[in-house]
Amino acid sequence: MIDFTMVWAVIIAFGVIMYVLMDGFDLGVGILYPLAPDEESRDIMMNTVAPFWDGNETWLVLGGAGLLGAFPLVYSVLLPALYLGVFLLLAGLIFRGVAFEFRFKASRERKHFWSVAFAGGSAVAALAQGIVVGSYIQGYQTENMVYTGGAFDWLTPFTLLTGVGLLVGYALLGSTWIIMKTEGPVQDWAYRIAPKLLAGVLGIFLIISFWTPLVDEFVRERWMNTLSLIWLLPAGALGCAYMVLRAVRRRDEGIPFVATMGLFVFTYLGLLASKWPYVVPPDYTLYDAASAPESQAFLLVGVLFVIPVVLAYTAWTYWVFRGKVRAGEGYH
């Protein structure tokens, strides 16, 4: 008999990491926007992500819809716990999306306003996503499958640190994307800032690694009492970090971006391994949160059709808009 709960867990986990990787680099470009050398560099940076950003967010919609249908308890607990955080996330994405369209058509005097909206929306969305991750690690106060905590329980020093960590991580992903997609002064600038961002990511990663066992006893027991393959995940993340640094110093163009994606994948797998099988920590597992098998089976039919279409569309888009982006070029 098919374990639909496990199938859906894999689908949603895949959708989340695809969103983080695909939308992460264009959020990173927005985060780096105010630091760009000049206005022409900003135009080039925005043009590198303009053809992709809306398609990248398809994975967020797919993961959110799948989560609602397959694991409704997650919605009934996490949304009351994270109302303000989710609002900030969506507001940031809205401001950023609007800025894409209006900045291209704005007059010189008003272009600055949309640049601020693009950069601010990207930073707020990244920070909010990281705070959500931190709140998931520290867990939620529940009783009889109902959230009983306060409106600001998600806002703690630990969640702020995870928020800043993801923001810096997205900036690193954005810098390596700029390296791959541009040339000349803007690429040289990206080469210079990538090692600094990598150092920031590793520093925050180290602090979180020591802090997390103090926040969650379950994570502490899993990592401290286990000598198994789980320790290959942080080792893989550090290996990818070394590849990023080495490739940047050699001025490779594609390897830094691929290695940074690997860094995100290993970190994500480490998070899943730390909390498995709890989807609403510290009390409820995947099976506690799952909807009826009949509902999961019905939804699975549609999702198994949609995912190949989204993958094909994504691959086609990246193929069509492959290559370098130069000054004066754009897709509008």
Image (tube, rainbow, N blue to C red):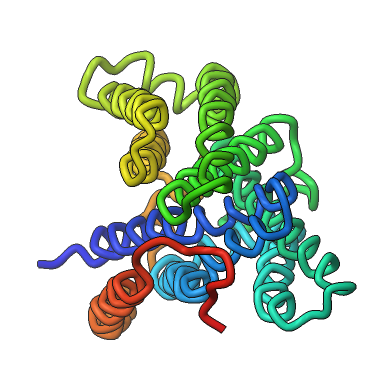
Is residue 192 visible in the rendered structure shown here?
Answer: yes
Which residue is found at the position 73% from the left and 80% from the top? 102
> Percent position (x, y) of residue 305?
24, 83
Does residue 171 appear left or right of residue 243 in this picture?
Answer: right
Nearer to the camera, 85 or 263: 263
Q: Is residue 138 above or below residue 122?
A: above
- In the image, is 180 to the left or to the right of 27? left
The residue closer to the viewer here, 248 or 257, is: 248
The C terminus sits in image quarter: bottom right
Residue 128 x/y as whole percent: 67, 52
Rendered image quadrant of residue 135: top right
63 lies above or below 307: above
Q: Position of residue 159 (x, y in %)?
A: 67, 37
Quadrant including the N terminus = bottom left
Q: Nearer the viewer, residue 294 or 158?
A: 158
Instruction: Residue 300: name its quadrant.
Output: bottom left
